[in-house]
Image (tube, rainbow, N blue to C red):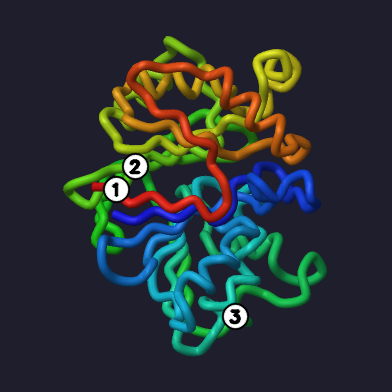
């Protein structure tokens, strides 16, 4: 399995020279089999534009799997050039919410909020809801489980190709020791890499816990409890300059888990 981080920022993009080391685009991770094109995309923040370059002139034919519908995870959809062309084939899956999936996303991407509607995008696009459970998507086994965030249903994902696995909990506000914590540990169990929300420091978390995000120390605790091999710090706060992220990472120490800063362009080749 190949994994490429295309956008690692949370809440809103962060342009400027103080952010270029980590990257300022919002959440997007591209996944491919050991051979073959990039066919599974996790979230569609502004980082999804980079997938067009990864495809090297080819159209996107695959699935975009959204963890939830907050703007920082959907705002790249209309700007994904490899999917907005006549030969593209795009399936968008969102957490099932009892409402037509396309209509739900079009609340943001249609006039007067946006100049075009989703139906104006070129190529073949379909939109569906996804329930919790195990699904076969683009040749991967995807396990979806609801995780606590805020203001809208959110799913965390485990993706496996049979020989390696990652877990993606981009926006996760866990309470250690709760039933949802135990479920998250089960979802993450033994993965090669856990891509996890690390937006706030412990001192910040006391003021913004209701936002439904996480701290690096709690993310590491989850990784250790689940036996994950690697923690990839993700969903960095838009005010967090490169040096701040580096210092947050330097404070994390584990004997069993390799801690990596999620940076735009980071490529993981999993066994």
Secondary structure under tag 1 reads loop
Secondary structure under tag 3 reads loop
Judge the density around disc 2: few (<14), some (14-19), many (≥20) Cα neighbours within 10 Å.
many
Q: Position of residue 161 (x, y in %)?
A: 22, 52
Judge the density around disc 3: few (<14), some (14-19), many (≥20) Cα neighbours within 10 Å.
some
Residue found farthest to the bottom: 86
Residue tagged 3: 121
Q: Is residue 212 left or right of residue 15?
A: left
Residue at x 47% of width, y 17% of height: 253
Residue found farthest to the top: 177
Question: Mark 2 or 1, which is nearer the eye?
Answer: 1
Q: Which label sits on residue 166?
A: 2
Residue tagged 1: 270
Q: Earlier in the sequence, mark 2 or mark 1?
A: 2
* Number of marks present in the image shown: 3
Residues at badges 2 and 1 in contact (C-beta under 8 Å)? yes
Which of 92 and 171 lies nearest the eye of the viewer? 171
């Amino acid at each position: 399995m190949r994994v490429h981080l295309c956008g690692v920022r949370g809440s809103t993009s962060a342009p400027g020279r103080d952010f270029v080391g980590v990257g300022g685009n919002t959440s997007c991770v591209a996944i491919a089999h050991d051979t073959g094109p990039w066919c599974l995309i996790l979230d569609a923040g502004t980082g999804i534009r980079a997938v067009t370059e990864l495809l090297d002139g080819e159209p996107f034919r695959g699935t975009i799997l959204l963890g939830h519908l907050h703007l920082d995870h959907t705002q790249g959809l209309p700007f994904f050039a490899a999917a907005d062309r006549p030969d593209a084939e795009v399936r968008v899956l969102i957490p099932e919410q009892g409402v037509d999936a396309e209509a739900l996303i079009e609340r943001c991407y249609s006039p007067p909020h946006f100049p075009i509607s989703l139906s104006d995008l070129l190529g073949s696009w379909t939109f569906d809801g996804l329930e919790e459970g195990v699904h076969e998507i683009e040749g991967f086994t995807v396990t979806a489980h609801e995780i606590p965030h805020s203001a809208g249903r959110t799913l965390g994902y485990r993706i496996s190709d049979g020989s390696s696995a990652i877990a993606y909990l981009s926006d996760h506000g866990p309470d250690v020791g709760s039933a949802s914590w135990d479920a998250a540990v089960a979802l993450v169990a033994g993965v090669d890499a856990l891509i996890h929300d690390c937006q706030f420091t412990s001192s910040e978390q006391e003021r913004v816990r209701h936002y439904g995000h996480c701290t690096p120390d709690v993310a590491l605790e989850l990784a250790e409890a689940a036996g994950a091999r690697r923690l990839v710090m993700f969903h960095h706060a838009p005010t967090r300059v490169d040096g701040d992220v580096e210092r947050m990472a330097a404070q994390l120490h584990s004997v069993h888990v390799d801690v990596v800063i999620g940076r735009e362009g980071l490529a993981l080749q999993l066994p």
